[in-house]
């Protein structure tokens, strides 16, 4: 039995079990996670609403369609021009001599490449970057020693080449950095920054807690969108760097973020 797991971590493990084994029975989940069947059904309801599972009588099965996480390599090729623009603009906000937490993801990978470009031009030096992304670390390697690269601990998620819990949040708990640069799957009109994968959302929350300022990087299609895993809420410590086709939904979300004191930068204008 797994005792006293936080609700989001419990749901993440349930979703992973459904994905890996093809089925999760309510009774089995209740016994394994040490909660009631009522709680399990509520958890599965949240996962179904996020498109991660579909419920049948007494069990959950993998969802048909709906939002699904894709491999990093596939996502990196999508909206590549917008991601490059975001990467360049976000990297321009990073100062020499500072410490940065750099999250996993295709857009943060574009930030990593832009940081290397700045370092190779002699514009950036004595930067410390802590990351839970193996691809991020390898992308930053050409800029060593101008950029010192530190990997968190954690458990490998092959899909994103990321390090998650158990281990990742614990390795972040003793840190305090100047800036966290985070990717996400959605930012809604109430200022919530969210992610499709619950395990990665948990590590992103630990990054927010370990940083003085927050830089969120997201293409405009993610504005006005909400997913299951909450990372945090926009505040005066938050800057959003975005790019891509500007829709009414994106405009409403940007205005809402500004009302919470966050700064919104459109990198392609």
Image: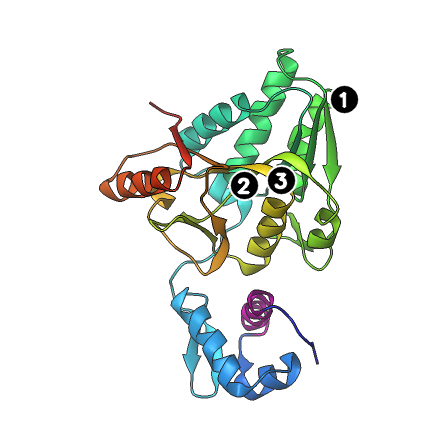
**Range drawn in magenta:** 7-21
Q: Name the secondary structure under disc 1.
A: loop
Q: Which residue is mark 1?
A: 145
Q: Nearer the viewer, residue 68 or 35?
A: 35
Determine if the magenta segment contains residue 6: no
In space, the residues marked 1 and 3 are separated at their CA atoms by 23 Å
Of residue 268 and residue 231, the one placed in the foreground of this image is 231
Marks 3 and 2, how far apart in space? 11 Å
Between tags 1 and 3, which lies in front?
Answer: 3
Q: Nearer the N terminus, badge 3 or badge 2?
A: 2
Q: What numbered label is drawn on residue 182?
A: 2
Q: Which element type, helix, strand or loop, lies under badge 2?
A: strand
Q: Residue at x 69, y 77 (%)?
A: 3
Tell me if residue 49 comes above or below residue 100 in the rendering: below
Task: Name which residue lies at 52% across and 57% down.
Answer: 197
> Which residue is found at the position 49% from the left and 23% from the top?
88
The residue that mark 3 highlights is 211
Mark 1 or mark 3: whose residue is earlier in sequence: 1
Question: Going by the image, does 84 lie left or right of 100?
Answer: left
The residue sitting at 72% across, 42% down in the picture is 175
Classify 10 Å Cα crowding around label 1: few (below 14), some (14-19), many (20 and above): some
Which numbered dot is residue 47? none
What is the magenta segment's predominant secondary structure? Answer: helix
x, y percentage for residue 134?
68, 42
Tell me if label 3 and label 2 are in contact, CB under 8 Å.
no
- Graded by Cα atoms within 10 Å as few (under 14), some (14 to 19) or many (20 or more), the crowding at tag 3 reads many
Q: What x and y, as percent, mark residue 130?
A: 69, 37
x then y, percent, for residue 258 = 35, 37
Q: Quadrant of the N terminus?
A: bottom right
Q: Is 9 within the magenta?
A: yes
């Amino acid at each position: 039995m797994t005792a006293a797991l936080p609700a989001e971590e419990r749901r993440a493990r349930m979703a992973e079990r459904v994905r890996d084994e093809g089925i999760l029975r309510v009774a089995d989940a209740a016994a394994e996670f040490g909660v009631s069947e009522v709680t399990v059904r509520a958890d599965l309801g949240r996962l179904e609403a996020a498109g991660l599972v579909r419920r049948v009588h007494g069990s959950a099965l993998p969802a048909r369609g709906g939002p699904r996480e894709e491999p990093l390599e596939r996502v990196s090729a999508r909206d590549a021009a917008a991601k490059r623009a975001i990467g360049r603009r976000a990297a321009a906000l990073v100062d020499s001599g500072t410490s940065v937490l750099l999250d996993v993801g295709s857009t943060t990978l574009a930030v990593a490449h832009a940081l290397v470009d700045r370092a190779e031009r002699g514009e950036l030096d004595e930067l410390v970057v802590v990351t839970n992304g193996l691809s991020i670390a390898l992308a930053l390697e050409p800029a060593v020693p101008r950029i010192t690269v530190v990997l968190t601990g954690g458990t490998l998620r092959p899909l994103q080449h990321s390090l998650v819990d158990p281990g990742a949040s614990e390795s972040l708990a003793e840190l305090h950095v100047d800036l966290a640069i985070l990717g996400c799957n959605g930012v809604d009109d109430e200022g919530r920054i969210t992610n499709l994968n619950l395990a990665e959302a948990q590590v992103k929350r630990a990054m927010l807690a370990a940083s003085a300022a927050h830089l969120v990087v997201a293409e405009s299609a993610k504005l006005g969108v909400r997913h299951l895993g909450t990372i945090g809420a926009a505040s005066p410590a938050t800057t959003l760097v975005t790019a891509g086709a500007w829709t009414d939904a994106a405009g409403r979300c940007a205005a809402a973020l500004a009302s919470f004191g966050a700064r919104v930068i459109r990198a392609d204008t």
